[in-house]
Image (cartoon, rainbow, N blue to C red):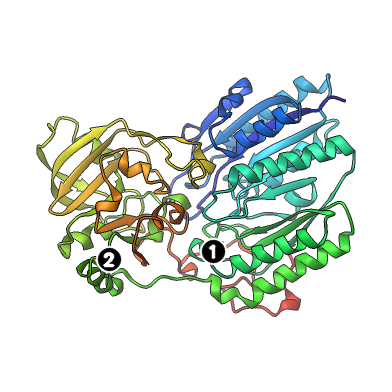
Amino acid sequence: MPKRVLLAGLFHETHTFLDGTTTRDDFAVRSGDRLFDAAGDGSPLSGVLEVAASCAWDVLPAVDLRAMPSAVVKDDVFEFFWQQFASAFHRQRAEGIAGIFLVLHGAMVCQTVPDVEGALIERIRALPGAEELPLCGVLDLHGNISRRTIERSQGFIAYRTNPHMDARQAAMDGASLLDRILTTGRQPTALFESSPLMWPPTGTATADEPMRGLEALAREMERENPEIAAVNVMAGFSFADTHETGVSFSAVTFGDVERARRGLRKLRAYALAHCEEGNVVPPPLEEVLPQVLDRIARGQTPVALVEPADNIGGGAPGDAPTVLRALLAHRVDRAAVVINDPSAVAALADVPLGGSKRLSIGGKGSRFTDPPLTLDVQLLSRSDGRFELEDRQSHLASMSGVQIEMGPCAVVRQDGVTILLTTRKTPPFDLGQLRSQGIEPEMLNVIGIKAAVAHRRAYDRITKCSFTVSTPGPCSGDLTSFPFRHVRRPLFPLDPPQPEHSAGTD
């Protein structure tokens, strides 16, 4: 049979503790041939299309839905995706379908479907003729992965770096795995191992322990056993209150299943032994500010002031005014922050450049953040908010490709602090965000960054030092502060670390 591959994508990281819901209007939708528009845009989908072209696949495009991390997704989003996918499957079935490739995140939660990816694969397997079809795909490193997602598929490949500079490559690796199956006819076995652990995003950087050691062990497993096609370390997404939430591992092997399973248990044991290192809770902002001011006085700038509690990449609204308030209170000069505040941008519509206006800034998107800050600001510029990533391997490319739209934007200033106001929340993962608005990051003393880890690839190159701080917000590193009800227990850090022999259940 020709390599006729059905291609689809469903990408959302769901923060279940946020108020409200995520609707179809929040998703960018591509249907049918519009999936081919992703070619060359640096996204995981573009990587699949590149491999498809080189391997002479006949790509059967179904549908691709993606949205920024946000609150629980309405059920009708999943049902819309499924209707589009199932329709494409039935249309193409008569001419034959050789395989299926899925571009997924791994931590999507709907109102009545807590494990969207697992439910999707179960639905696919129930389609006539789909039970035995090779099904491969790509997953975000932060997926909360279920056993059925892994063991009902032939091989998902997860990102191996955080920041996610390899998202496109991971998708290419997953597509190459599918092509290997289609070409050779050999079916691998996919294995899964859970753990009684979850870590905040601040503890999941792959340059730091324990993820650095886990990734090294995973790559060692692949080198030592050529029959193992992939070993995945999923750090999980801790702001999702689901049974699947937490750190997990998987392997795809064409060889000895028990050997691969022993390797996964070794990974689990390493994670348990290093669980405290992953539970990263930053110090309070006020405790760190004297050190920031000292670095400025010494000329050791720019300083990155990182605020993971308002991490846009984790679903936060990106409008907490806490760092802005502190910078103004301490009269910090040549500082910049980005605040997502559509109402503030709209309020500046009739203000001439150079004019002033009293604005209520930030504090509107989450009950967890500080209240709005009222400032008399000067308008420096306004724009349509479009920019192209300077770094095509940016973490942001894994979510949105290289063409980014922040919506209408305005740059304002009070005293020594420049504020970029955006209409669409945009993770601070690329320096092009500031430069496109006339803000040169290298010239600043302090840059307020609403992120946990993914900003590092961009900002570590230009900053002299970085401080990560605790502030009020929905992505706090203190996981014990969230009202978890649905996670499996015991689960660290909600519960004491468990002995190695009691782990691995789900």
Residue highlighted by disc 2: 300
Q: Is residue 192 above or below residue 197?
A: above
**Which type of secondary structure does the marked residue at label 2 adopt?**
loop
Residue 300 visible in the snapshot:
yes
Question: Whole-Å distance between the Cαs marked 1 and 2?
Answer: 23 Å
Q: Position of residue 166 (x, y in %)?
A: 59, 48
Q: Is residue 429 above or below residue 275?
A: above
**Which type of secondary structure does the marked residue at label 1 adopt?**
loop
Q: Position of residue 157 (x, y in %)?
A: 70, 48
Q: Name the kind of residue labelled 2 in the image.
A: Gln
Query: Who's the residue at 34% across and 59% down the image?
Result: 463
Q: In the rendering, which numbered label is found on residue 328?
A: none
Q: Relative to residue 271, is residue 452 drawn left or right?
A: left
Query: Who's the residue at 43% across and 48% down the image?
Result: 429
Q: Relative to residue 376, is residue 177 drawn left or right?
A: right
Which residue extends farthest left?
355
User: Along the line of sight, which residue is nearer the eye, 132 or 488?
Assistant: 132
Q: In the rendering, which numbered label is found on residue 207?
A: 1
Q: Position of residue 181 (x, y in %)?
A: 84, 40
